[in-house]
Amino acid sequence: MATTVRVWDLPTRIFHWALAACVLGSLGTAWAPGDLVEVHAKLGYVALALLVFRLLWGIVGGRWSRFASFLYSPASTVAYLRQRGHPDHLVGHNPLGALSVFGMLAVLFAQVGTGLVSDNEEAFTGPLNRFVSNATGLGATWYHQAIGQWLIVGLVVLHVGAILFYLLKKRENLVRPMVRGDKEAAPGTASSADGASQRMLALVLFAACAVAVWWVVR
């Protein structure tokens, strides 16, 4: 008989939805008419703080939020694709979901990084642009506008498509656990720590990340 376990701790859930809001807001301000470059930049700074926090939380966060819980070997991924997966694949991120997470983190880090050193020679110059050559700044701007944003769009579409696939084909709702935190799992499945001390640690870590990003931007 299945039991209910805490899979996604509150800091992970807040991170997930806050980052989603930043990504959608950044795309919207990039495409919307009018001069929204400052709003776009601020959303990027918030996204950077969230991303750095997620790296730290991937080490000290709840059981299923730690990278160690979904850092799968190629053999494990192949086994999952052949429907011979490990029981842990059914709790947190499965191997395909893990690839999506790491891919999204890498692409978003590249996007905010190029934004920090970019120079579109019109309305915006990144706060770290003065530390790179003109060619590097222009190259970063080109990647940011011509490549990076479309990689993000592709990953977002893939992410939403995967959610719909699991919901319609496998009858598995991946959104509900990311809202409520809990999920049905096999008896004996470990739960993620999500108490007051864990949440306070997350708050302190995010505050430190926000201050660090503010210092870099300044």
Image: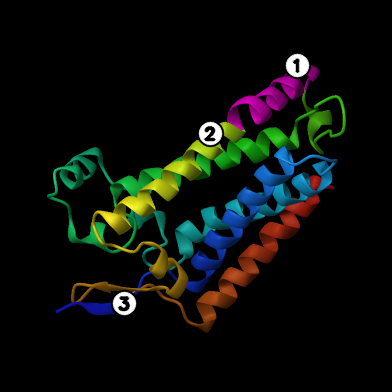
Name the residue nearer the viewer: 82 or 196: 82
Which of disc 2 and disc 1 is earlier in sequence?
1
| Real-space Cα separation, disc 1 to disc 2, in angstroms | 22 Å
**Residue at the spot x=80%, y=36% of the render?**
126
* Residue at 40% over, 69% down: 176
Which residue is disc 3 drawn over? Answer: 5
Q: Specify whether 163 is left or right of 128.
A: left
Which residue type does callout 3 highlight?
Val
Residue 54: image quadrant is bottom right
Residue at 47% across, 64% down: 60
> Which label number is shown at residue 92?
none
Q: What kind of element bears circle 2?
A: helix
Q: Tell me the mark number nearer the camera, choosing from 1 and 2.
A: 2
Q: Tell whether 70 sits left or right of 114.
A: left
- Report crowding for label 2: few under 14, some 14 to 19, many 20 or more residues within 10 A (C-alpha): some
Q: Is residue 143 left or right of residue 135?
A: left
Q: In this view of the protein, which residue sits in the foreground, 15 or 215? A: 15
Among numbered discs 3 and 2, the one appearing first in the sequence:
3
**Region of the chain picked out in magenta, as a range:** 133-148
Quote the CA–CA distance across marks 3 and 1: 52 Å
Decide: is 16 above or below 127. Answer: below
Tell me the amino acid under the disc marked 2. Answer: Leu
153 is within the stretch colored magenta: no
Say which residue label 1 marks. Answer: 135
State yes or no: discs 1 and 2 in contact (Cβ < 8 Å).
no
Circle 2 is placed at which residue position?
A: 151
CA neighbours of label 1 inside 10 A, class few (<14), some (14 to 19), many (20+): few
Magenta: main secondary structure equals helix
Q: Residue 211, position in %: x, y?
A: 75, 59
